[in-house]
Image (cartoon, coloured by chain):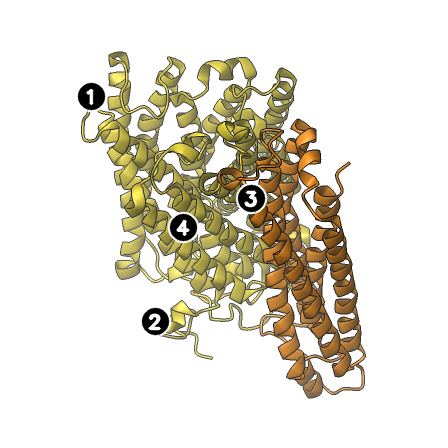
Chain colours: A orange, B yellow
Amino acid sequence: MSTTSQTDSKRLFPLHDHFQRPEQQVDASKLGMWLFLATEILLFGGLFVSYAVYHQLHPELFKAAHHFLDVRLGAFNTVVLLFSSLTVVLAIHGAQQGKREMVLWNLFLTIAAAATFLVVKYFEYKHKFHMGLLPGYYFTNGILISPDESHIFFGIYFLMTGLHGIHVVIGMIVLSWLFYRTYRNEFGPQYYSPLEIGGLYWHLVDIIWIFLFPLLYLIR
Amino acid sequence: MSSNTNYINAKTGFASWALTIDHKRIGLMYLVSIMTFFLVAGVFALLLRTELLTPANTIMDAKRYNQLFTLHGAIMVFLVIIPGIPASLGNFMLPLMLGAKDVAFPRINLLSYYIYLFGAILALSSLWVGAIDTGWTFYTPYSTTTDGGVVLMVTAAFVLGFSGIFTGLNFIVTTHKLRAPGMTWFRMPLFIWGIYATAVIQIMATPVLAITLLLLIIERTVGIGIFDPVLGGDPVLFQHFFWFYSHPAVYIMILPGMAVVSEIVTVFSQKRIFGYKQIAFSSIAIAVLSFLVWGHHMFVSGQSELVGMIFSVLTFLVAIPSGIKIFNWLATMYKGSISLKTPMLWALGFIFLFTIGGITGIFLGTLSVDVHLHDTYFVVAHFHYVMVGGTFMAFMGGLFYWWPKITGKMYSEFWGAASTLMVVIGFNLTFFVQFIMGSQGMPRRYYSYLDQFQIYHQISTVGSYILGLGFVMAIWTLLRALKTGKPATKNPWHAATLEWTHTEVMPIEHNFHEQPTVNEGPYEYH
């Protein structure tokens, strides 16, 4: 804001020593996050390639095995994550407007959505463990006996959703930390880039699920 | 501010190092760690060469030999050469050369060092669980069936990858956002261009290694059947995944070497670099091409002939940007006032040895020739010419070049030059004969061999002792300078880049007394 004095803006924007201007610091942290997101996509990229290779080699296997996933639960979780992406955007919007209450509420809703996602995932996993629909050596299901290598589908399923689940947990930690910092009144219209950066990460977690859901649950 | 304060004496005590966020101190901590692992893995190499003095069991059996060459390879690749120049010299010099106070994310920089240390501890602890014997490439299905601490070593490589990712991320953002006023992209020193291209590869390739190694760990523990043929998996898929990272990784290793040489050649010729933009863009071209050539490691793994031909052609393309660099360095020296100081000697050694390494790479990239040379000592010699003759020569050159700035002391020119000579002689004795025995069919990774190869192996072993002694001499020369070296001046080489022109003899904690501004290129010698 043009009306705030030098000392005020220093208090409102914690500029690190090695940066000269606030915009420089914000730009640097955003660029850093985008690069990090690129590495995350490449990390998941390896799994998507494995999926593509084995789906192409054994399409019948993927078709048979995916019936054991519950489309309704997957769809519910998709909606939950999409909703959480909205709330995280609203939290940033609130910070830009200086509405602390709005930030806190929306961060809370985002964290709650993440927790809901994990609870649903827990019940899905529990079901698969119960049925013996597990990767490799632990595959003991007696119903899905043909084709032979059905365990590969569940190996890929658990790897993809498991790695995504870990990202949800990390996202929850990041969001809780942002909640704490908002609670301590650290953000305002001048300084909210940590919220933006945390939000970017959360969108990535969301978008990976958007790809996982059809690939795993909606095989034709 | 007194002119005697510098980044070393500004603060003292263990915590001032362990918790430092100063890029210069972090660079030094990396340097010490990397050199320690270099010496350890170097001793392994000498033990391997000693075993090969005779075709019989000289000092160890086959099993121990397999474990030792795996450790030598894994430590040298993951703990020494990949972090090597960027994490040590790059960390120290990048902000100084850009006119910045620090890297963009100093705390992440420190974090990446501790991730590196953690990875190193994991890697070495695999020795106690059971040394692994897969080779540094961890090929399946052998790596999923052999005993020993495969999971531990693979986890170590996984962890070390993240250290590299964070360093690369830091360097890219720093280069984009923290250049001094007036420092346009084409006024950046070529060292920065090389390090930047390296960072791009690190960011884009390492995550793929991470997921590959994760899949390997899961394959070994749970058996998901992605790589293990017994469970329906495809071992060649592992090779595709592995080389999709590990081929770019060899450019992670060589690009920083080229970056250092680009600095040394122009400074010690006191002549503006020839073809600045070509050298800069050739670094980027190498980075791009590095992602398109992984299949040349798999010409005999059963990939289709068409794919093999495409990978072969793409591999040849890498020779173009590499050749551009070589010729530009030579043209820079032409009619320059060359002074043959130690850094320049290392750089000349680099150009000589890297050229041999590069040209033999073309032999190996040729389909029909590779069928004959695949998995022979020819391959071993080729990549040692690139990795040691290339990268490590440049690393040593860079250390001698920047030693006065890092430590404030001048090293002994005599011992510096002598050690360079020892290394070049020892290196060629060790590895040139390996080209010959490789072309005659001596396979790599065997602890025994036919009698006809003994004379070559013995020459190679003697050479390796000279090579080892040369490196010890070089490091000793640097260390001795700390105690007995003459005090350095601010810019002993008359270089024109910011780390020499705008800093004290040893940089202060925040690098510059005031923000430098730039109004000309990095190689304008007046």
Q: Picture quarter containing residue B306?
A: top right
The residue wearing badge 4 is B399
Q: Nearer the viewer, mark 3 or mark 2?
A: 3
SS state under label 2: helix
Q: Are marks 4 and 2 on the same chain?
A: yes
Instruction: Work out how far the residue at label 4 is from the one at label 2, CA to CA, in angstroms.
Output: 25 Å
Q: Picture quarter containing residue A215?
A: top right
Relative to the observer, which residue lies in front, B4 or A58? A58
* Discs 1, 4 touching: Cβ within 8 Å: no
Instruction: Work out how far the residue at label 1 is from the one at label 3, CA to CA, in angstroms.
Output: 52 Å
Q: Are marks 3 and 2 on the same chain?
A: no
Where in the figure is residue B67, as x and y percent of width and height?
A: 31, 35
The kind of residue on which mark 3 rests is Gly
The kind of residue on which mark 1 rests is Ala
The residue wearing badge 1 is B56
Where in the figure is residue A200, as x and y percent of width and height?
A: 71, 61
Q: Nearer the viewer, mark 2 or mark 1?
A: 1
The residue wearing badge 2 is B14
The residue wearing badge 3 is A132
The kind of residue on which mark 2 rests is Phe
